[in-house]
Image: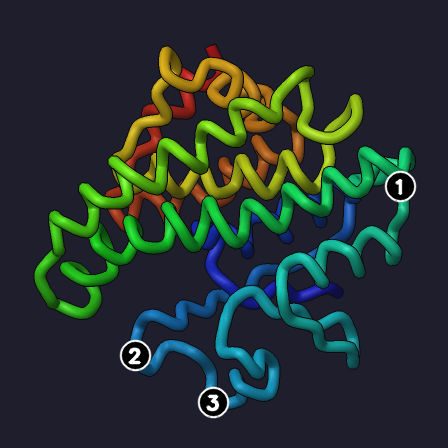
Amino acid sequence: MLKIHGVPISVHTRKVIVVALAKGIEHGVIPVVPVIPGNPPANWRELSPTGKIPAITDGDYTLVDSAAICAYLERRRPSPSLYPADPRDYGQALALEQYAGDNIFRGVVHPLFHEVFVHPKVRQIPTNPARIDEVLATTLPEVFGYLESRIAGDFLAGKSLSIADIAVASNLVTFQYIGFELERKRFPRLAAHFGRVCSTPAFALALERERGVVDSMQLRRDFLREAAA
């Protein structure tokens, strides 16, 4: 059975979980939280040379990096496909998956998550309000504005759910878990897209399964009701 090593509220771990669910691949989630000292197992660097989550083990096969893992799962079980057949849509899906990792996560979600949760609650160091303000005032408008401009239909690349939609929405879930708002009036197409992706069966099931972790961390979930409206 496929084993996904990570924590469900992780943007990248969730992406892999949603792909596995969408494809009906039986799997288990093995909790690994690298930001908590002493949490990763003793062999963690063997499973994940970068130390990052997620990693997978599939029998005697090990793989790291969420993009690589999702591409592997696509080949392992091609249907339903999460990568468009049209060459241009395929390229767009890969580009937006990369944008989600490089710009949404690294530019917005990662710094905010660390300032709001990791620093005060795990590392016991003060939050830096100036850093939060900088992300919200400078980086977020550029990143979310770009995504808003790329949405012309129901999905980001092609006419059905793709890896691009999953990658973007996964970031926006964690962004809102930690108390920030995806402003509907400011980014109406992005907000509508988020609601559509969250309502797909695989994504909705992933969110329901991670509910216990979210509640234990005292994160917010109320935005999911609004997204589904």
Quick check: marks 1 and 2 in contact, CB under 8 Å? no
Relative depth, front residue between 204 and 145: 145
Instruction: Name which residue type carries label 2.
Output: Pro
Mark 1: secondary structure: loop
* Quadrant housing residue 179: top left
> Which residue is painted at 53% across and 86% down in the image?
45
Mark 3 to mark 1 CA distance (whole Å): 36 Å
Mark 3: secondary structure: loop
Rendering coords of residue 75 (x, y %): 88, 56
Mark 2 to mark 3 CA distance (whole Å): 12 Å
Instruction: Name which residue type carries label 1.
Output: Ser
- Position of residue 2 relative to residue 219, above or below, is below
Rendering coords of residue 113 (x, y %): 30, 52
> On the image, numbered disc 1 is attached to which residue?
79
- Position of residue 88 relative to residue 196, above or below, is below
Earlier sequence position, callout 3 versus callout 1: 3
